[in-house]
Amino acid sequence: MPLTDLPLDALREYRPEVPAPADFDAFWADTLATARAAAGGPAVYTPVADAPLTAVDVFDVRFPGWGGQPIAGWLLLPRGARGPLPAVVQYIGYSGGRGLYTEHLLWSAAGYAHLVVDSRGQGHETPDPDPVPGPQYVRGFMTRGIQDPEHYYYRRIMTDCVRAVDALREHPAIDPSRIVVAGGSQGGGLALSTAGLAGDAVAAALVDVPFLCHYRRSAEIASAGPYPEIAEYLGFHQRHDPEAAFRTLNYFDGLHFAPRASAPTLFSVALMDPVCPPSTVFAAYNRYAGEKDITVWPFGDHAGGRGSQPVEQLRWLAARGLGGASAG
């Protein structure tokens, strides 16, 4: 994928004028208050007794998310580490779920508790039972409920992500003052929204090649990935008011979560990314209110820095007093 977006100097100054909805804060305050008041009970952590691992304890997780609905996850704890532990809450990329616990061993190996959050409707263990009014682009999630922010898919999954932090803060093995949110692509966008919504409950955010940012420009220039779902939907339904879709998307844009986030953050961006164009990443990064840094991968595609980025993250966290626990 060749470099097709803005030059790096221009990206570092790119701050598009995209006003947030007037009731953005009220919308999200009501959403989270409703979710926290819903039934669902405490999080349940069931040991995976037959996990063939000698250095990690694995738990199958169910915690209440949107509407009190049970959200699946994995909790991995480094065996023998001194607690209470710092923790990483990981959100997953588009169309993926929590997968197998053996796919998620980095953070526990580095001395962190690690909560891997399933994505409702995308993973295998967490359905998305809410009815969706109106037409949508049926092959994906980007237009599910796009006519109304009350019913939009990402209202539910973003709520699930905040509730994951709520749940983990209550776990006896976790230091609630050292919870990091992390993810790449969709997971990066969800880490950003959680940092903006969960406030002081988040100690740091690792936001890799984030999706869910600057929707209009993304729909106009992204050549691969999920954003073209929006363009195709609008192509079919442009006889209606296309601005209605963007009014809904504006409640879920990383551009508006970024200035509401105060936790230190490390972003990453790839300058040859056709899925999350770099201008859409910098549009959110340049608005971020807390301490921030960004790793730029000039020849990276949507895989960003690949295996090099976790090394950057571990060093960055350690420099801020958020390193992993040592073994007992």
Image: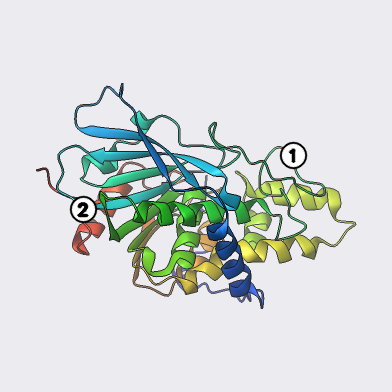
**Visible residue check, residue 253:** no
Which mark is on residue 84? 2
Label 1 belongs to which residue?
138
**Towards the viewer: 122 or 164:** 164
Q: Is residue 305 left or right of residue 319?
A: right
Examine the image and state in which quarter residue 285 appears.
bottom left
- Residue 191: percent from the left, percent from the top? 45, 56
What secondary structure is found at the residue carrying circle 1? loop
> Of the residues shown, which amino acid type is indicated by label 1?
Val
- Residue 75: percent from the left, percent from the top? 35, 40
User: Mark 2, residues whose alpha carbon is within 10 Å: few (<14), some, or many (≥20)?
Assistant: some
**Towards the viewer: 253 or 126:** 126
Q: Residue at x 56, y 65 (%)?
A: 33
Q: Is residue 8 left or right of residue 108?
A: right
Which residue, as the protein is rendered here, is positioned at the far left? 328
Disc 2/disc 1 C-alpha distance (Å): 44 Å
Q: Is residue 142 left or right of residue 192?
A: right
Q: Residue at x 53, y 42 (%)?
A: 70
Which mark is on residue 24? none
**Visible residue check, residue 9:** yes
User: Mark 1, residues whose alpha carbon is within 10 Å: few (<14), some, or many (≥20)?
Assistant: few
Q: Residue at x 37, y 60 (%)?
A: 205
